[in-house]
Amino acid sequence: MITLSAVTKSYGTGADALRDVSLEIGKGEFVCLAGPSGAGKSTLLRLLLREDVASSGQVLVEGTDLATLGREARQAYRRTVGFVFQDFRLLPERTVFENVATVARVMGQSRAHQWRRASSLLQQVGLQHRMESFPLQLSGGEQQRVAIARALMNEPSLLLADEPTGNLDRALSIEVMDIFRTINASGTTVVMATHDQDLIAYVNRRVVQLQQGQVTDDRRPE
Ligand SMILES: Nc1ncnc2c1ncn2[C@@H]1O[C@H](COP(=O)(O)OP(=O)(O)OP(=O)(O)O)[C@@H](O)[C@H]1O
Ligand SMILES: [Mg+2]
């Protein structure tokens, strides 16, 4: 599903954020991206979301070279991807429900469908009672859970998550991982960056280790 071939990403400042990274991720895999701060994890996720392009090398998703996508194709591509990023990116002037449902609205789904799915996801992340709140009225962990519900709203074929449990306690982190495992079992490919070794052990799936922009280890559980 995803093929990175000799991908280098330079921001033009200091060392390359990614250096000659080649990686294949199959459809339906659950991959944890591990590695210290500055290793290149977020950079790799941003390339997969096509928020940024590689300086050299190729990023292919389902056979499409993401660098070749024009504006509209890029938007269409992003609608097939769910993402949870470190800074949540919620719309402050929209309610929790609207933040989660927007994707479905853009895709022309009925209000009834939006309501059912958004309520069900918000319930799964324990926020059904905050549907009418605004993001800034929520704690960091609550905002993170709204972002997770939003990412799952359109049943994405690819879920990208950058430290999705960074603001959550252990019990909530485990619940979020269980939601990810369920969506992965239904066919969604998951790529998740995390520092959290306990979480990586709990997930117990493929782990790609990055260090100074390079893949230093890539292992699957026995
Ligand atoms: N927009 C940017 N402009 C310049 N340099 C950047 C930019 N974004 C990231 N970098 C640099 O690229 C390298 C990789 O950063 P990246 O954010 O991908 O690391 P990370 O593994 O996600 O780290 P963390 O665990 O702290 O989130 C770092 O050296 C960082 O300083
Ligand atoms: Mg990061």
Image (tube, grey):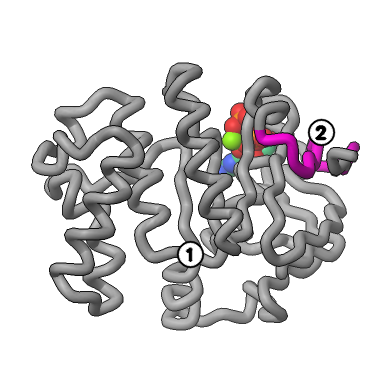
Q: Amino acid at mark 2?
A: Gln
> Does the image show residue 136?
yes
Residue 123 is labelled as: none
Q: Amino acid at mark 1?
A: Pro
Distance from disc 1 to disc 2, alpha carbons, whole Å, reads: 29 Å
Q: Name the quadrant containing residue 33.
A: top right
Residue 211 is labelled as: 2
Q: Residue at x 42, y 74 (%)?
A: 75
What main secondary structure does the magenta stretch of the protein show? strand
**SS for tag 1?**
loop
Report the side of 203 relative to 140 (left or right): right
Name the image quarter holding the C terminus.
Answer: top right
Q: Residue at x 64, y 74 (%)?
A: 67
Q: Which residues are magenta?
A: 203-218
**Closer to the camera, 14 or 105?**
105
> Does the image show residue 56?
no
Q: Residue at x 71, y 80 (%)?
A: 63
For ligand 1, the image quadrant comes to: top right
Q: Name the quadrant containing residue 101.
A: bottom left
Specify whether residue 215 is painted magenta.
yes
Question: Residue 79: x and y, percent?
Answer: 42, 70
**Closer to the camera, 178 or 8?**
178
Disc nearer the start of the sequence (1/2): 1
Specify whether residue 84 is painted magenta.
no
Q: Residue furthest top?
A: 169
Reading the image, the residue beneath label 1 is 156
Name the image quarter holding the N terminus.
Answer: bottom right
- Figure check: 136 above or below 179: above
